[in-house]
Amino acid sequence: MMEREHDMLPPKLADRFFKWYCNKPLYESIHGDMQERYEEYLEEFGAKKANRKYWMDVVRFMNRHTLKRSKKSNTYNSNQLIMFSNYFKVGFRNLLKNRSFTLINVLGLSVSMAVCLVIILMINDQMSYDNFQVNKDKAYRFTHRLNSGVDLPFATVPLPLADQVEENFSGIDDMVRFRSGFSGELLEDGKTVSINGLFTEPSFFDLFSFKLDQGDPKTALTNPQSVVLRKDIAEKIFNGKNAIGQTLDLGKRGSYLVTGVLAEFPGKTHIQFEALASFSSISTLEKNGSLVSALSNWENATSSWVYFTLNEGVNKDNLYPLLDDIGKERYNEDSKFVANFSIQKMSDITPGPLYGNQIGSSMPTFFVYGLGILAMLIIVCAAFNYTNLSAARALTRTKEVGVRKVMGARRHQLTLQFIVESIIVSMLSLVVAIGLLQILIPAFEGLKMSALLNWNLEVTPIIYFQFFLFSIVVGLITGLFPALYMSSFKPIQAMKKIVSSNKLSRVSLRKALIVFQFVISLVLIVSSTLVYKQMTFMIEKDYGYVKENIINVQLQGQNFEILKTELEKLPFINHISGANNIPSRGQQSDIDVRISQPDEPINFNYYSVDDSYIDNLQLTLLAGSNFLPNHGKGKESSIIINETAAGSLGFSSPLDAIGQPLIIDDSTKVSVIGVIKDYNYAMLFMDIKPMMLRFKPSHFVYAQVNLSGFDITNEIQQIENVWKEFDPNHAFEAKTFQGEIDEFNNFFYDILYIIGLISFLSISIAAMGLLGIATYSIQIRLKEVSIRKVLGASTNGLMFLLSKGFMKLFTIAMVIGFSLAYVANNAWLNEFAYRVKFGVDIFLIAAGAMIIIGALTIGLQALKATTANPATNLRDD
Amino acid sequence: MNSNLGEFEEIVLLLVAAQHGEAYGLSVTKSIEKELQRSVTMSSVHTALYRLEEKGLVSSEIGDSDGKRRGRRKRIFIITALGKKSLIAAREARNHIWDMIPKFVIEIAGI
């Protein structure tokens, strides 16, 4: 042995590797041996080869003696692994053996899973807002609440709050103010493009993680009248030309120099804008009147937002006393507007509680929770069915369980095995469900709601992983109960194919389950039919005015009278009237009306119209007279009210209301000159409230043009031609009245669509469940059926025998189901002012559908049982 | 008696006995290489030693470091009574069968 030690050390990595895998008791001595050897290697072979030999030694030393062991005994661990592969093998074979059952299970589960997957996508989408922001956990914004009893908090605050806080509180790091109102139309290349954005400050780029593709974030928003465009908007406006240095002319709002183009950002943000204009532009705009005063206006709390970050170590709670003081200082106790200021974390904005005046679209949290709960319900339904079906199949597995138990399987091992099987089914369903997604996602994105909520339902690898986890959880949930049941078979009885009469085989439970399935299906069919009827009813109901052949032309700032004169030259025009709003679209203005000064005000809805309005829409005058043309000029003096208004003013007959003087909004004195019959000016499910027609041409936004309608396309084209000459700068914007209402109703169509989808889903799940129960019940009686057959029973007789039990249950289910459906549906239908009634046809449709489902599921099974060869069933006896 | 010793294990056990009190992984390895001209890895010798210890034929203890191995102590293996017995039994079994071989089959000088 060499006495001296070399300075060379063995390769460090090898040493580290060895230390990692070797167990403690042996480590030191083996390492020492290897070191000694290494010295000899060095002597004999030189450094390089010695290192190599050392590595080989290290690798070779890995064996079961030297490797670190986990706490459990070695044999147990290696066994588990082997058993798992056995479970998978056996599970697959089983599934293949009972192909039809597996198919039913997988299909039923995959439909539910597909819907849940979409929900997972939606939730993911909603949680992804502003994830790319560096400051996402550190940014806050001010919010306010009114003291007027309105419970809704608002995301906006008055602008001067920002400066006041910054002056009196030293912990503010960055602060960004936003003001809405950077919107308008600009003329570019001969076409008008509308643009919508916010005013904001240079600190925007400090607080938020938006980057500029072009331009300098430090200076882009410094100078007044500069603007930063979003990349896609820049491309849309300038068609590929360089945007920087160009000027945008927004008419009243002024001209702006493009100083930056915003880079695309990963993900979504709750702050919605197409362009950002410099905050410094606001003062000029306020001076020339194109923007309502906000910069120093404590009363304007609806058009501005203030975001901020705090310095290290500063707690936002320290701001509250200051906010309280500001609130007390700026607002009198009894002023109309008393605000309580508060702070909200940016990460709590979306999904978050419902706030008014959000800076962009956002989803209230309860919606996300609602989605989650919906997903859980669907899974519970599917799980329920899987349990039923598995219980049915359990009988066929008794021998297997018996043998396994005799061979020494413990209960938990058997449970594990069956759970593995259900996880396999769940995985298969996942694959099918992902396939279904290809259809479902486009369908969901086609909903009108999607445009509103700006869903991004894209599947990323992380989401696939979530799907994977989800299907494992589903497999666990659905498989747990059947697994526990099947693993509880006693070996000897199982071998003899006698299943103990525990809960699942008792007849009453089976009956209850069948009734339950029937009831669910019934309620669903009735409900979806009702929803469909209600929706179509609302869409087709007579609103009380005429909307056919009326086109609503947007005035876009033009003078109504002049346009009217021009259009009247066309031969097919019947009437033209002006209005500030289109009825039945959910937008109506409202205002307070009193009979005399000290009275309590009554809130009236109103429309600003002209003297042709009543004729145009063919409303009915019950008393009094229409507007005279001169009523629209000068001071407002006359109004026309509806029946309900007359009633609310205390008049028993419309005639009595004529001539009644009223005060509008504490300022305008008018008198009633006419009363019209009630019509649905609001959305159909709202009650008709007191409403009045006012003659105020300055409010006009639309010209409602009544055509003859013989050749609508041509007539609209001619109107468009007139418009083009009249106002070449603006695109012709007009819609048919019916079309507008349809468009608005599209929202309801969406709901219909979704409810239909859910109903279909649930009914198919219920049908699957029914199939399972039917199979199960009939399987139990297979022997009986075979014996009867041998003794000479007829097929018909047997069919009747098997179905008899179900008929009874069916009837019970009908009774329960219809009563339940009646109660449940009445509840929501009564929310509507106008609703459909329960009719015999609903009863027939539902019952018919049920009979079909019942016949298909139970009948088929019964048929299969009765036509089977008795010999096969009686073989074992 | 316990299960029969493998050939390699027997050799290792013999060497443990031969090096009495001084036997450790590397020393046995080097002996095998030197005395028997067999190439053998340290790991196989170590494994054999651990198996022998499992069977109770040797016992081990951590000895002092002798200044040579940068302070790392050695695990010294000592043959147990059981180990001695199985060596003797093995040898007797061999000899017994040797005795059965007629002289002319295997000529060995000196026997």
Image (cartoon, coloured by chain):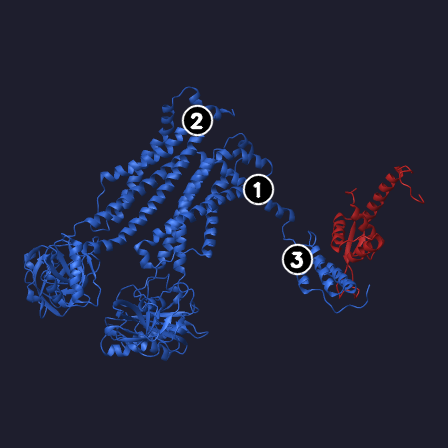
Chain colours: A blue, B red
Q: What secondary structure is found at the residue carrying circle 3?
A: helix
Give the residue type at disc 3: Tyr
**Mark 1 to mark 3: distance in Å?**
29 Å
* Of pointers 1 and 3, the one earlier in the residue sequence: 3
Q: Earlier in the sequence, mark 2 or mark 3?
A: 3
What secondary structure is marked by label 2? loop
Residue at the limit of the structure toward the top, as seen here:
A792
The residue at which mark 2 appears reads as: A868
User: How far from the left and from the top, in percent, is residue A395?
Assistant: 48, 33
What residue type is disc 2 on?
Answer: Ala
- The residue pinned by badge 3 equals A21
Q: Earlier in the sequence, mark 2 or mark 1?
A: 1
Q: Relative to residue A667, is residue B38 drawn left or right?
A: right
**Are the residues flagged by discs 2 and 1 in contact, CB closer than 8 Å?**
no
Vertical placement of residue A242 versus A490, above or below = below
Badge 2 and badge 3 both on one subunit? yes
The numbered dot on residue A499 is none
Q: Residue at x 44, y 42 (%)?
A: A106
- The residue closer to the viewer here, A133 or A578, is A578
Give the spatial CA distance, label 2 vs label 3. 63 Å
